[in-house]
Amino acid sequence: MIEVKQLYFKYPTMKDYVLKNINIKIELGQIVAIMGSNGSGKTTLIKHFNGLLKPNEGYVKVFGKDTQDESVAALSRKVGLVFQNPDHQIFSDTVWNEVTFALKNFGFEEEVIKKRVKWALEFFNLIQYKDTSPLLLSGGEKKRLCLASILAWDPDYIVLDEPTVGQDFLQKEKLREVIKMLITRNKTVIIVSHDIEFIWLLQPRIILLSNGEVVKDDVCANVFKDDASIDKCGVIKPQFVELFDHLAPLLPHPPLDVLEARSTFLKLMKKGG
Amino acid sequence: MTPLIKFIDFNFSYLDSPTPILKNINLEIKEGEFVLLVGPSGCGKSTLLRCINGLIPHLYSGVYKGKVIVDGEQVSEKNISTLATKVGFVFQNPENQIFMFTVEKDIVFGLENIGVDKEEIGRRLEWALKILNIEHLRYRAPYELSDGQKQRVAIAGTLVMHPKILILDEPTSLLDPKTAYEFISTLKELNRSIGITIIVVEHRIDLLPKVADRMIVMDGGQIVFDGPFKDIIKEKNLHLYGVTVPPIISLQNTLSESGVNLPGYSLDVRSFSEMIKKEVFRND
Amino acid sequence: MFWIAEGLIYRRQDSVFHTIDPRIKLLISMMLFFLSLVSSTIVEFSIILVLIFFIGALSKTLKRMVRTFVFSLSFLAMIFVINILVGYDIMFSIIISLRFISVVSSTSIFFLTSSPDELELVMKSFYLPYDLIFAFVTAVRFVPVIMLDAIQILDSQRSRGLEIEKGNFIKRIKNYIPVLIPLIVQAIIRSEELAEAMESRAYGFSKKKTSYYSLHLRKRDYFAATVAICFMIVFIYAIYFLHI
């Protein structure tokens, strides 16, 4: 479990706190979306989850251990962070070695490394590139490689910073499948994202941030009911929530996806006709 | 009316790659159009844009066949600086297109380069600051700006050149939804008020239904769909071309596949809801 | 997020000294620099340092100026100790240390009170080639951006178990490879994007490039320059002819 209690944080030379009085608990087996406008502190917050940043006040505990007392490497074993820009991490000569990097750092056995890397590359359809330079991959492939290089060591928490930026529809579908699969294995996926329709399809718990403070922390359906909060955080409503607002008496609840919407409307039309 | 941009039997491949990146492109874009260009990553859309403002073939060379004509002149025969006064280009990452230490200095950068006199620079600067609503940012440094503000500054820096065409390559991908929405509205405003032709590559199509006139879908270096936005967005297999179709439009597509005859086709949630209410209550 | 680059960048401040023409600020800075080189007694250094601190106070940059040489204190100590070890007497070592302080702080006067924009104008007024000026300007402009890249890259690799301080000397150097390679790749990507953006805004057209900004000397600038030059003449006269 990740437990954040009364966390305050500011960068050394700055006057104002970037994060103020954050209190959250994130259990295993959840999808959590962190949303908010640019500069609201989302990335600063996730960097606390594996100890890259340490609180000025309050604490962050990962499986009961205070991040102040643990190394980033030890925490990362449990909490894997995938940052937005793949070019910020890719450095190896081959795709294969890019994925082995972390496993070697964590001291896995040679045999285990081979098995894990093979699994990860196959899972993300990258195995055919194992001997090519990762710099030659397309943008979407690079993003998948970064995810593969983190999933290979099997962390309990997977934190994704803007995973859908620059991704086309099919790549996003694949990502959604991966997230669903991780949840069935009792992992927790934490997503920082602006992609509202993508988030709506996942129906996660949403933490809304504004100016370094948690404005709302609730299930997806409830968060999008709160007009004032989402507006404050630079978020707009998913289309199906807006649809529900317009047609409230006709619909039981905002449709979760197109298929559900279709059957609701088909029923509605039949009743009408 | 002669088209503002015209591709005639155009083919292009980069020097280091054996496969052509653009194949047999024939395309006409009229003055004042607002064009949305989409397609999966690697489909050639960025390359196409770079052929319009002359980065291809002037900065990137390759095998260049056919013609690209912008405002009556062949791109390959004009130098890139002359083209800069016809075509403004705003890139995905705002950080890398602001060179100077203050917004004001950055906006006048292009004008100084083409040798506009001081008084005219002053006039155009004031105009651009005003039209993009960034007067308050005038003396700020780039690191004091948010990403949304940087994108506005980038547009201002190209608008002062009085281009006829404004090209934007995924301009909102780093912006939060509300800021992205405001940004796209600003583009539409510009399109209406000064009649500038806009071509935008954008993944977030849900932002654009009320904005774009025309939609072009590319795949494998070719144009696969081209037509009015409201017609193309109805195409069944758009998702196969990497397009994320807005849910409200997917819904209408699947309903009509299931044999429902909707009285019309709505591009946004509000008008769809109105339509449904009428339909259901009329039948009641 | 730009906290790390804070110390490197000019901060906009309002003071009488900031509004002086950058060429005059450069003149004053260079003059004090020159005097620091020719001075050789504690009295002379005291005068120079008092003057530098006075300008620091006037331009509200005293705190940052002091911070600069608190930062270089270890270096200063080293100079002092080496001088003693080599066999110079304490007096001489003190003089050398004082010279170091005044050289460093006199140059910082210009950089703490002039924006990079002003620096660009100064370079233009010396008729340096525009390509050179532009290269300089963008280099300074992108320092904080590249610093942030470096931090982000370091964070990414630490999140993949890289422990940069771990291991023996050779291992530690090797530890930097996963940080350096993405940093270089990122810099190349940036420079390509920059080139595109520059071309798209008619950079290099320049047959008759105009300049929207220019420097004009005003009364107060002439005044400041006169005071500075008079001071220098008096000071040198005092050193060499009056042997103070």
Image (tube, grey):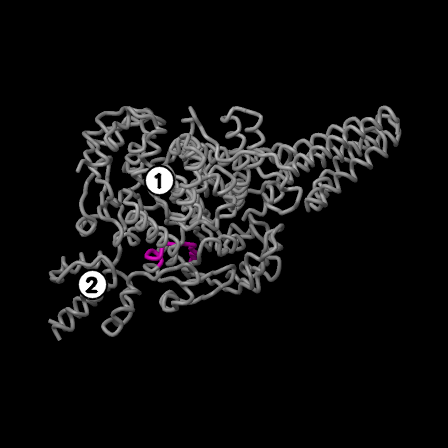
Residue A132, given in percent of the width and then of the height, sits at 38, 32
How far is mark 2 from mark 1, CA to CA?
36 Å
Q: Check contact, mark 2 vs mark 1: CB within 8 A.
A: no
Residue A126 image label: 1
Q: Quadrant of residue B121?
A: top left
Above or below, comparing residue C201 to residue B195 in the picture: above
Residue B112 image label: none
* Disc nearest the viewer among 2 and 1: 2
Which sits in the foreground, A51 or B205?
A: B205
Residue B198, given in percent of the width and then of the height, sits at 29, 43
- Residue at image point 60% right, 33% down: C173
Identify which amino acid the numbered label 2 is placed on.
Arg
Q: Quadrant of residue B45?
A: top left
Mark 1 element type: loop
Residue B227, given in percent of the width and then of the height, sits at 18, 45
Q: Is residue A15 magenta?
A: no
Q: Residue furthest front?
A: C219
Q: Quadrant of residue C121?
A: top right
Which sits in the foreground, B182 or C91?
A: B182
- Residue at image point 60% right, 42% down: C10
Q: Is residue A190 magenta?
A: yes
Q: Which mark sits nearer the N-terminus, 2 or 1?
A: 1
Q: Is residue A158 visible?
A: yes
The magenta span reads A187-199
Identify which amino acid the numbered label 1 is placed on.
Leu
The residue that disc 2 covers is A262
Mark 1 neighbour class, 10 Å CA radius: few under 14, some 14 to 19, many 20 or more: some
Chain ID of residue with mark 1: A
- Residue at image point 19% right, 65% down: A263
